[in-house]
Image (cartoon, rainbow, N blue to C red):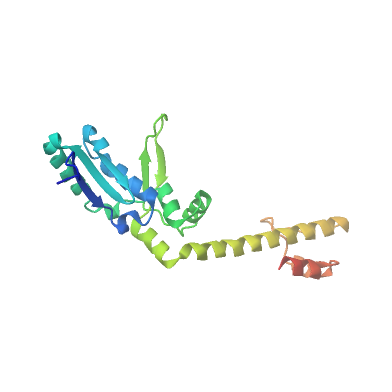
Amino acid sequence: MKQDADGAELVELWTLPFAARLGSSIRSKGLYLEIRARLPVAARKSLSVKAGELALRMPQTASKQFAATSALVSRALEGIESLPVIPREIEDILGISTTERHRWLKDGRLPSAGTRSVKLRGRARKVTFHVFDPRVVEDILDRGLIDTWREDDAVTAAENRRKAAWKAKLTRARKTAGEAVPRQPDGEPSAHDDEDRFKLRGWAEFERDMM
């Protein structure tokens, strides 16, 4: 328990460890809200957060309440590094978009640590979302995997565009020649399409343009 410079109030400070906030102001705010929610309603306004630091401030006349609240905050901070990371926090920590989060969650590169359901103000139903293990998130951050994933996605997208353009070129050429484009049962072009494409005028130039 400490007094401020002019002795007008009681103050106690706690620094959120990096392993808990992971360099994110949004994560820091989320941790603050989690701890604040564990305090008595009357004491919640006395706790604030700034630059990764929690501050409890109360008037000198509330010394007993201050001591009790301080103890609650200290207990709430125990194991705070293990608190799951929620979507808006992981996006800020890793510097990713919501679209990237959904894509990498779906293909398994961003493993889920389970789901959490909350009832938002003004909504009748609860909202359920995936949460993430902070140690996994820290590992992704430390290894710089986001850049690698984006490079992989760019290569995949370019390949998909090339394939789509090739199929469209082949279809147009065959329609011009009055032929039907043979298909396999799954809807993909038949095996001899690769041979036929070399007979199309200008095909070599087209493939070079797509590289």
| Image label count | 0
Q: Can residue 181 be seen from the camera position used here?
A: no
Q: Please provide percent x and percent y for residue 16.
A: 28, 53
Dividing the picture into quarters, in which one does residue 44 lie? top left
Of all residues, the one furthest to the left in this rendering is 64
Q: Please provide percent x and percent y for residue 29.
A: 35, 46
Q: In percent of the image, x 26 and y 44: which residue is there?
A: 35
The residue lying toward the viewer, choosing from 64 and 167, is: 64
Q: Can residue 35 be seen from the camera position used here?
A: yes
Q: Please provide percent x and percent y for residue 42.
A: 22, 32
Q: Please provide percent x and percent y for residue 151.
A: 56, 65
Of all residues, the one furthest to the right in this rendering is 177
Quadrant housing the C terminus: bottom right
The residue lying toward the viewer, choosing from 186 and 137, is: 137
Query: Vertically, is 190 above or below 28?
Result: below
Query: Vertically, is 55 above or below 200?
Result: above
Judge from the rendering whether residue 106 lies leftward or rightward of residue 4; answer left or right.
right
Q: In percent of the image, x 48 and y 62: which residue is there?
A: 146
The residue lying toward the viewer, choosing from 129 and 148, is: 148
The residue lying toward the viewer, choosing from 201 and 208, is: 208
Q: In percent of the image, x 28 and y 55: which residue is there?
A: 81
Judge from the rendering whether residue 53 lies leftward or rightward of residue 164; answer left or right.
left
Q: In percent of the image, x 48 and y 52: which residue is there?
A: 101
Dividing the picture into quarters, in which one does residue 72 lie? top left
